[in-house]
Image: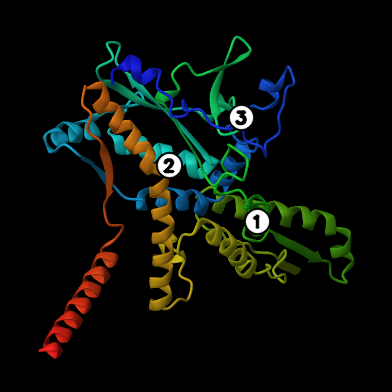
């Protein structure tokens, strides 16, 4: 299949019966009414959450890294070396290279915003892939096609919504789309309320430390019963204030520590020393537990030293493994389409399959232990039959 046939290829060219459970819209502006922007309306809020709460940003980065690396297996062994060179050197955007770089950006967009869009850019002569492009979600829109089973990716051109010219070269993946919807849901979808409470706690802690941590003093002069002290109380208070300010200012400017000497009944107290700051450990942990439960990352991977047992840590690692495998399944069709397109443009009809590396060594050790146990059981059964 050449470039011309590939650009005109659609997987939904086969005819199908009409869908009976979808709304039939014959409105003249139905194309505008049915379009859905891929960028969620709260994309600014999602970015602010990641910027304001570092643990959210760290969790997303760890999920992308823990998803692991992969290789592409070709059905024709003679083409395997050529496919490996393409996977390792294909251009991605203006400065990156390699299919792994494209997948990392693609998965990051999928997790953070619920949708990911990419594009295959062929060469002008149509016999190779020039680059892979990660599209901005703000620039892409989607609408229902001729039937509810079809979707069209569109862009704005001259204030008009225009379908992409070559849909076979566009890559699109939604994350957990609701029934009947084409747009996915971001992984942070249920966290704005929890994040708002956490940010209020952080802000209050900052204000309290600014007030209590930066010590302020109350200097009180009490005149004696002598008539001279009462008559000169104002002058004495002014002199004490000046000397105290000089002593404190010298220390703040990096100068030597100066002592303050006063004559008479002078009382010096720290403002707010009797008040205790409200403990934020319990509410902060409650909010972080909700965030971590949604993101699916074990606490110890984020540097949280919460009490846990070795067995609990192993169970959390198993849960994380299943989460990562689900993300891999979402990426498999994208990887296959990119590499199959590359081989088609090269004039080959071979197919490709993603081969993911083991997520961690612990899984490999456990799998080997299970195989050893089964082998011992089979050996004992054969010996018993003799």
Across and down, in percent, residue 68 comes to 32, 50
- Residue 304, can we see it? yes
Horizontally, residue 108 falls left or right of residue 47, namely: left
Across and down, in percent, residue 379 comes to 14, 82
- Using the image, determine if residue 148 lies above or below residue 241: above
**Residue located 40% across and 54% down the image:** 324
Across and down, in percent, residue 242 comes to 70, 51
Numbered label attached to residue 107: 2
Front in this rendered view, residue 41 or 171: 171
Which callout, 1 or 2, points to the residue nearer the camera? Answer: 2
Mark 1 = which residue?
194
Front in this rendered view, residue 172 or 68: 172
Horizontally, residue 84 falls left or right of residue 274, namely: left
Element on which disc 1 rests: helix
- Residue 101, can we see it? no
**Quarter that holds the N terminus:** top left
Element on which disc 2 rests: helix
Horizontally, residue 381 falls left or right of residue 58, namely: left
**Residue located 36% across and 38% down the image:** 103
């Amino acid at each position: 299949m050449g470039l011309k046939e590939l650009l005109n290829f659609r997987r939904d060219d086969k005819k199908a019966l009409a869908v009976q459970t979808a709304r039939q819209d014959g409105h003249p502006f139905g194309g505008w009414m049915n379009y859905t922007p891929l960028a969620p309306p709260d994309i600014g809020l999602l970015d602010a959450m990641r910027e304001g709460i570092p643990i959210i940003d760290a969790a997303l980065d760890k999920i992308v890294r823990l998803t692991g690396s992969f290789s592409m297996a070709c059905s024709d062994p003679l083409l395997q070396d050529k496919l490996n060179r393409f996977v390792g050197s294909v251009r991605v955007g203006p400065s990156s290279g390699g299919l792994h770089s494209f997948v990392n950006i693609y998965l990051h967009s999928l997790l953070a915003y619920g949708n990911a869009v990419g594009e295959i850019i062929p060469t002008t002569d149509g016999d190779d892939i020039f680059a892979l492009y990660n599209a901005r979600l703000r620039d892409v829109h989607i609408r229902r096609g001729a039937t509810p089973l079809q979707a069209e990716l569109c862009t704005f051109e001259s204030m008009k919504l225009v379908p992409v010219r070559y849909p076979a070269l566009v890559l699109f993946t939604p994350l957990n789309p609701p029934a009947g919807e084409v747009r996915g849901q971001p992984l942070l979808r249920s966290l704005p309320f929890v994040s708002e409470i956490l940010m209020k706690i952080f802000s209050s802690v900052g204000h309290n430390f600014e007030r209590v941590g930066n010590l302020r003093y109350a200097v009180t002069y009490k005149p004696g019963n002598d008539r001279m002290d009462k008559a000169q109380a104002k002058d004495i208070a002014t002199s004490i204030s000046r000397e105290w300010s000089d002593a404190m200012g010298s220390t703040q400017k990096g100068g030597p520590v100066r002592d303050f000497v006063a004559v008479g009944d002078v009382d010096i107290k720290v403002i707010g020393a009797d008040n205790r700051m409200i403990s934020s450990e319990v509410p902060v942990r409650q909010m972080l537990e909700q965030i971590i439960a949604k993101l699916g990352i074990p606490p110890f991977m984020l540097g949280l030293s919460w009490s846990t047992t070795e067995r609990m840590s192993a169970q959390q690692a198993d849960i994380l493994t299943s989460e990562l495998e689900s993300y891999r399944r979402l990426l498999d069709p994208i990887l296959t389409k990119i590499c199959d397109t590359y081989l088609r443009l090269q004039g080959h009809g071979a197919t490709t399959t993603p081969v993911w590396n083991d997520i961690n060594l612990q899984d490999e050790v456990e799998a080997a232990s299970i195989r050893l146990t089964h082998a011992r059981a089979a050996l004992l059964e054969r010996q018993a039959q003799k």
